Amino acid sequence: MPRLLAIVFAFSCATLVSGKAFAYLDPGTGSMILQGVIAGVALAWFTIKIYWYKLTSLFGKKPPESLLDDDVNTDGEA
């Protein structure tokens, strides 16, 4: 554990002491960041949806047989 603490401390010091970086960010960087944010939101939504079904089934509500069936009424209408 002390070795890990030393590594974290060294990394922190190196990060805080670094000087100016004259870096170029091309226009593709913004779209990559936007794509990552959208993917993160979709992943969070899907994860919450999965655990919501597990939680509701714990309290007695019968979950749909498929995650795709939750948006379909019993009449077959969307």
Image (cartoon, helix red, strand yellow):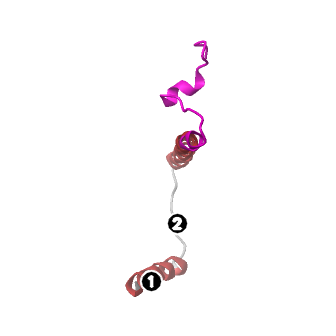
Residue 18 falls within the magenta-colored stretch = no
In which quadrant of the rendered image does the N terminus lie? Answer: bottom left
Q: Nearer the viewer, mark 1 or mark 2?
A: 1
In this rendering, would 76 be left or right of 11?
Answer: right
Q: Which residues are magenta?
A: 54-78
Mark 1 or mark 2: which comes first in sequence? 1
Residue 69 falls within the magenta-colored stretch = yes
Q: Is 36 located above or below residue 76 in the figure? A: below
Disc 1 versus disc 2: distance between alpha carbons? 31 Å
Residue 6 in picture, x, y percent from top left: 42, 85
Q: Main secondary structure of the magenta part?
A: loop
Q: Nearer the viewer, residue 44 or 31?
A: 44
Instruction: Tell me the number on the disc at residue 61.
Output: none
Instruction: Tell me the number on the disc at residue 5.
Output: 1
Residue 69 in picture, x, y percent from top left: 53, 24
Judging by the rendered image, the residue that carries numbered circle 2 is 22
In which quadrant of the rendered image does the C terminus lie? Answer: top right
